[in-house]
Image (cartoon, rainbow, N blue to C red):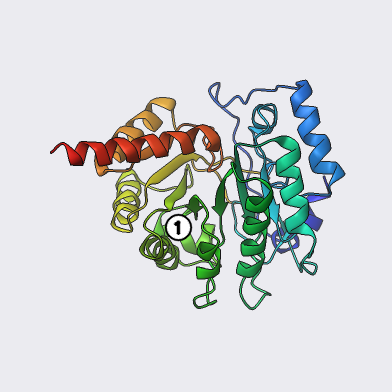
Amino acid sequence: MMNRDKRHPEKKNKPINPIKKKPSWIRSKIINSKVFFETKQVVNKNNLVTVCQEANCPNITECWSKKHATFMIMGDTCTRACAFCDVKTGKPNQLDSFEPIKISNAVKKLNLNHVVITSVDRDDLEDGGSEHFYQVITQVRKKNSNTSIEVLTPDFLRKGQAYKKVLDANPDVFNHNIETVPRLYVTVRPGARYFGSLELLKNAKKINQNVFTKSGLMVGLGETKDEIIQVMDDLRTAEVDFITIGQYLQPSDKHHPLNRYYHPDEFKELETIAKTKGFLLVSSSPLTRSSYHADEDFRKLQKARSDKVECHQHQ
């Protein structure tokens, strides 16, 4: 991996925030299986970018050993500089017009039941990359008719109605991460707007009632329990179906300082609270990431919706 200063030139002069020692419960599984190396080979051979690698995800060996990979489209360079994120910041390259075909071929080669497609922020593009998302989803579906498709999108801030193009492609899951509580946006996610992200999720559900909407929240950045509960309420008002809650892990000493590690019991408590709010599905644990176990979770979402409809019919 390239030098941190080259990956994050905007953080070069930031103060040093020492990284706290990880507690015993923050231990990811290292699984160097045959399937892991097969997945890696397909990704590398096709020159594909994955968020698993670029964001330094702790679950990479576990997920890739199950042939679960989250493809990151539109390059490896983001136009934003979020204080929590390890994806490279800078001036991106032009879009690769062959990328939709490459992703589609990789999905077929890996024989995926469920694929997650995310992207860097592309504020340099007039539509924020929504047309490219549309092309990728369309190509994947053309070659992989039995594969369910989940998108994890940027916020399309100041791009008007561009986000609608992504929904025109009819993904099965529309995910946009709220990331943190509104008070911390100015330091954690300075290029984004909390209520803009909420509006995006709300509008996605308005446009397509059948799409499952999903959003993720990191904890350990300095938020309070009351603030987390408020975010849950806001997401439910926006009719979000699925919330993921995971521990923030500080990528380097120049990233946003970690305030504290949450104990697994606290994640269980947050899960219980979220379930009482009416989410169809809740995933809350130290190593939960928005795409972690996405395949299994999609099946659970389908069952939860089906059970809910059945329950209403019997009332």
Q: Secondary structure at mark 1?
A: helix
- To which quarter of the image does residue 135 belong? bottom right
Could you tell whether 128 is left or right of 196 in the image?
A: right
Image location of residue 279, percent across then percent down: 32, 43
Could you tell whether 25 is left or right of 128 in the image?
A: left
Could you tell whether 242 is left or right of 36 in the image?
A: left
Q: Label 1 crowding class (10 Å Cα cut-off): few <14, some 14-19, many 20+?
A: some
Image location of residue 108, percent across then percent down: 72, 41
- What is the total number of numbered labels drawn onto the structure image? 1
Q: Who's the residue at 41% across and 39% down the image?
A: 301
The answer to whether one can see residue 282 in this image is no
| Amino acid at circle 1 | Leu
- To which quarter of the image does residue 267 belong? top left
Q: Who's the residue at 67% across and 75% down the image?
A: 125
Image location of residue 46, percent across then percent down: 83, 47
Image location of residue 80, percent across then percent down: 64, 65
Q: Which residue is mark 1?
A: 184
Q: Quadrant of the N terminus?
A: top right
Q: Who's the residue at 47% across and 61% down the image?
A: 185
Q: 31 or 91: which is nearer to us?
A: 31
